Amino acid sequence: MQRNYFWPRFGRPLAVLTLMSVCAAVAWAQATERVLHNFGGPGDGYEPTSGVVLGSQGDFYGTTYYGGPGCSLGCGVVFQLMPQADGNWTESVIHEFDQTDGGQPNGVVFNRGGALFGSTQSWGAGGFGTAYELTPGSNGVWNESVLHAFRSEERRVGKECRSRW
């Protein structure tokens, strides 16, 4: 059975976007849709604008443009969706942006060591977004390191960096 996971980009209310699973048993005509998580924000984030990456334990990681502390609508979050034994999924916010480390994240990628890397479009020490790394700690808490804070003269570079993540 093939599974395809995707984000609906438009057509849903701002605060209720969903990650859906489409299962194709034999042919696309027989596909069924199942909502894995409704993002209600601001605590769990809202408006996911990029896809998800698959973790080594079968969980998904992604970002939302809004939610979390700081900023008028929240600066965005990095989340983890974990499959449960009963077939449901549980969401955990593993990082909340607060303007000092950037805001409005663009998605994440894994490296071979299990760290997540991403970039943000806004804020940070330079005012024009950041490149960051999240590493899993031994106690289940993810630790963030800002790798670079983009400045106004690097604004174009920051946008090019976003497309590479």
Image: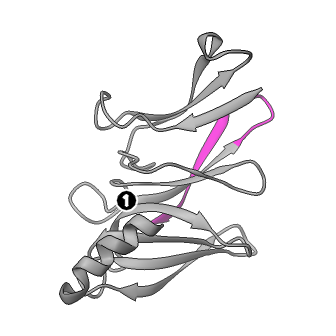
Residues drawn in magenta: 83-96
Q: Name the residue under label 1.
A: 76
Please indicate, yes or no, whether residue 30 appears anywhere in the rendered image. yes
| 75 drawn magenta | no
Query: Which quadrant of the structure image shows residue 133?
Result: bottom right
Residue at image location 45% in from the left, 48% down from the top: 44
| 89 drawn magenta | yes
Q: Main secondary structure of the magenta part?
A: strand
Residue type beneath disc 1: Gly
Can you say whether 165 is above or below 156 in the image? above
Query: Which quadrant of the structure image shows residue 157?
Result: bottom left
Q: How many marks?
A: 1
Please indicate, yes or no, whether residue 99 appears anywhere in the rendered image. no
Residue at image location 38% in from the left, 68% down from the top: 162
Q: Is residue 128 left or right of residue 8?
A: left
Residue at image location 52% in from the left, 54% down from the top: 62
Along the line of sight, the residue nearer the viewer: 17 or 23: 23
Position of the N terminus by quadrant: top right
Outermost residue to the front: 27
Can you say whether 54 is above or below 26 in the image? below
Residue at image location 40% in from the left, 61% down from the top: 106
Can you say whether 25 is above or below 106 in the image? above
Secondary structure under tag 1 reads loop
In the image, residue 51 lies at what x, y percent? 50, 48
